[in-house]
Amino acid sequence: MKVLFFGITSLIALIVPLAALAQRSAAEYFEEGNTKAGTGDFSGAVQAYTTVISMSPEHAPSYFNRGLAKANLKDHRGAVADYDRAIELNPREPIYYQSRGVSKSFQEDYRSAIEDYSKAVELNPEDPKGYYNRGVSYAKLKNHRSALADLDKALSLNPDELAALYARGNCKQDLQEYAGSLADFTRVIELSPKRTGAYAGRGLAKIELGDYQGAAADFTRAIELTPNESEYYSNRGFAKNKTEDFQGAILDFDKTIQINPDNYNAYYGRGFAKGKLNDARGAVTDLTKAIEIKNTYVGDPDKITYSGKINREILDGLRDQVQQHIKIDNLTNERAEAYYIRGINKSKMGDTKAAIQDLTTAVELNPTYSTAYFSRAMIRSASGDQMGAVLDFSSSIKLRSDFPEAYYLRGILKNSLGQINDGCLDLSKAGELGYTQAYKVISSYCN
């Protein structure tokens, strides 16, 4: 399992002389807060710093240290409020921005966190933590190129920083730079031989690079370190299938299913292995499970739950505003174009079933017919088959990557089905491609 994580800024008690504080008792309370924070008594530390603040409301380090204590108590909203005040009083301290960014990141407010990390980098460009944290936030937003640039910078300042190496390994995998990913995870393992995730990450890189035996060995080591992680068995089973060790693969998938009975990938892999061992009946049973478990793309479209911010009524309204640009194309020998236009007209007549049949014939005759997939998706969505519509919009996008209306409609459909993040990313892509209506929807349903 790939994990990108933030380096939690350790609670650093800024032992600032309180000569400016007239009362000795304020200094004593400040020291008490530092001591309690150092021993893990963060609640006590909060109380001590609160007392200092009541005596000297302009003392920025007390707000900052109280924010750190709150962050360690997982009160990140309260921490941000304290960091805000510390920054008001002293806007030139980079660690204040760094720490506020961390608390915002824990609240998944990555865009705002990036602004804070950028300010920290501006004030202290030699601190690798700012680049690391900003890189991880970019990765969370799937801006992997910016993430990679920041992680490269962090590692140029501190070449053997484990967290940055691990994060960069994951980032490179997302960018399909598997050789670089393998090198990063290998370095993590050299520095920290018991880092389970590094073996798992390297194993995935080896699978993509075709080194299936090496991948199996890495997942074996990951299993030795963390024996109850189902994905490690599943991935090792996949590698064994690739090396035609079908019996070994079945054992791994058995273990995966024992730990996680809903792992449909394991049923798929085990079904494949059983088929190779001529157990056709067992293969069919497993592959049926692989198709059915947690698959929102099968079942009765009428039973779909619109669990996102866009309900069925809003969805229908947004979809029906999109204009289809129906153009005449030269008629090929297969006559796919005629089926397409006939399907559009049958839809206008209200004959949905016949319209879908014609459009299906069109894409069967011409599998690269992007607009036919798009039109079938529109009809399926109008009839309530949102899952089928998502698949058709995806096919349309795969054939034509610059199709803004397809991204837009897939985005609102995914949002309505509860896939908020994916839906909003599609809407963002539609806006990027020039479909400005997407930004109105983003403003209303993605924030």
Image (spheres, rainbow, N blue to C red):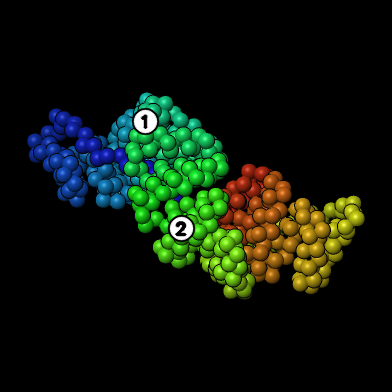
Residue 243 position within the rendered picture, expressed as x and y whole percent measured from the top left? 55, 49
Q: Is residue 304 visible?
A: no
Residue 155, image quadrant = top left
Q: Is residue 189 left or right of residue 392?
A: left
How many numbered discs sit on the rendered protein? 2
Tell me the kind of residue under disc 1: Asp
Q: Which mark is residue 252?
A: 2
Residue at the spot x=26%, y=43% of the render?
Answer: 68
Tell me the kind of residue under disc 2: Asp
Residue 12 position within the rendered picture, expressed as x and y whole percent measured from the top left? 23, 37
Residue 265 position within the rendered picture, expressed as x and y whole percent measured from the top left? 52, 59
In the image, is residue 104 above or below residue 145? Answer: below
Q: Is residue 14 visible?
A: yes
Residue 357, image quadrant = bottom right
Name the mark nearer the viewer: 2 or 1: 2
Nearest the eye: 384 or 370:
370
Residue at the spot x=19%, y=50% of the render?
Answer: 43
Nearest the eye: 350 or 302:
302
Q: Is residue 229 left or right of residue 295?
A: left
Q: Which residue is mark 1?
A: 160
Q: Which mark is residue 92?
A: none
